[in-house]
Amino acid sequence: MRCGTWSVVGEAPDGTRIVHPLACRSWSCSRCAKRNKHKLLQRLVGVKVTTLLTLTCNPARHPHIDDAFLQTSAAVNFLFKRIRRRWPQAKVEYFLVWETTKKGWPHAHLLLQAPFIPQAWLSRAWEQLTGAPIIDIRAVHQSADVVSYIAKYLSKDPQAPSGMKRYRSSRNFFGPLFPSEPGTPDGVKNWRLVPRGAFEVARELSSGGYTVAARADGSYTAFPRGDPRAKSMSVLLSDRIILQEVCP
């Protein structure tokens, strides 16, 4: 089954249908990587970040590169436990994305929501955990810099070994979960697999009398003819395609 060639279709009690493309969501997939990056950068827009931090590793401490990634990743968790103990009243959250050096050793680039952390204290703590005293920490003055900073690393080939996420965040970095996109009906059920792409299914629904709107996430909402929500829902472009209602 190739990515995007199948869909899942659900139906609400009022007859509204939702069509979702069945995607692999893998960063190694040329189709999904672009969407993954776009969605992640959109989440980062507007997130308040105070600091950019880069952490290095000490290759002499590791028998091979995969071990360096695993140990560095674990050390990040211990580092933030220390930071929270040192500043117990402060909000301390992070977003991490990996980068590799030319020789393949890991660097961790982090966006922080944290109080001022002295460079000397941070360097000393990181050296105690990893044997690598070299860190880079700098204040963020413009939020736009954050998105471009992360986009640079997400645009590269996968920077982490197989089985490791190329990025991660602490529990409350993004704050509350986003609300559902306006226009999504409640009670959608009876989901079924369809061996056709989402656009093909949406086009069939349009031909069958539904008013179909493309959504920003690549899915489609199909309203029964005459449904008042179809007129008020703003049409979102997906691949610059707008499906028009078919006249009787």
Image (cartoon, rainbow, N blue to C red):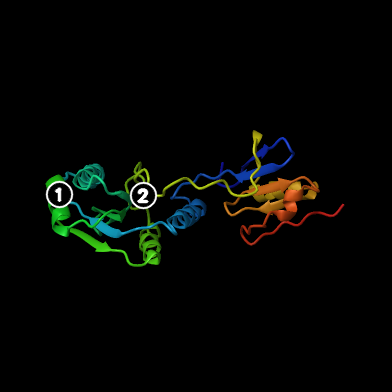
Q: What amino acid is at disc 2?
A: Tyr
- Quarter of the picture holding the N terminus: top right
| 203 sits to left or right of 32 | right
Image point (29%, 59%), residue name: 51
The residue pinned by badge 1 equals 125
Residue 195 location, x and y as percent?
65, 40
Q: Give the secondary structure at mark 1.
A: helix
Q: Quadrant of residue 45?
A: bottom left
Residue 159 seen from this side: yes
Determine the residue located farthest toward the top in the rendered image: 190
The reply to whether dot 1 and dot 2 touch (C-beta < 8 Å) is no
In the rendered image of this protein, does residue 36 appear above or below residue 1? below
Label disc, if present, on residue 167 of the rendered structure: 2
**What is the CA distance from the residue labelled 1 to the residue labelled 2?**
22 Å
Q: Give the secondary structure at mark 2.
A: strand
First of labels 1, 2 by sequence position: 1
Task: Tell which of 43 and 24 is nearer to you.
Answer: 43
Image point (70%, 42%), residue name: 17
Label disc, if present, on residue 97 of the rendered structure: none
Few, some or many residues within 10 Å of mark 1 (<14, 14–19, 20+): some
Residue 86 location, x and y as percent?
19, 46
Q: What amino acid is at disc 1?
A: Ala
Image point (72%, 42%), residue name: 16
Residue 63 location, x and y as percent?
17, 44
Image point (50%, 54%), residue name: 35
Q: Quadrant of residue 116?
A: bottom left
| 39 sits to left or right of 12 | left
Few, some or many residues within 10 Å of mark 2 (<14, 14–19, 20+): some
Residue 211 seen from this side: no
Task: Tell which of 208 and 112 is nearer to you.
Answer: 112
For the image, the number of numbered tags is 2
Residue 33 location, x and y as percent?
47, 53
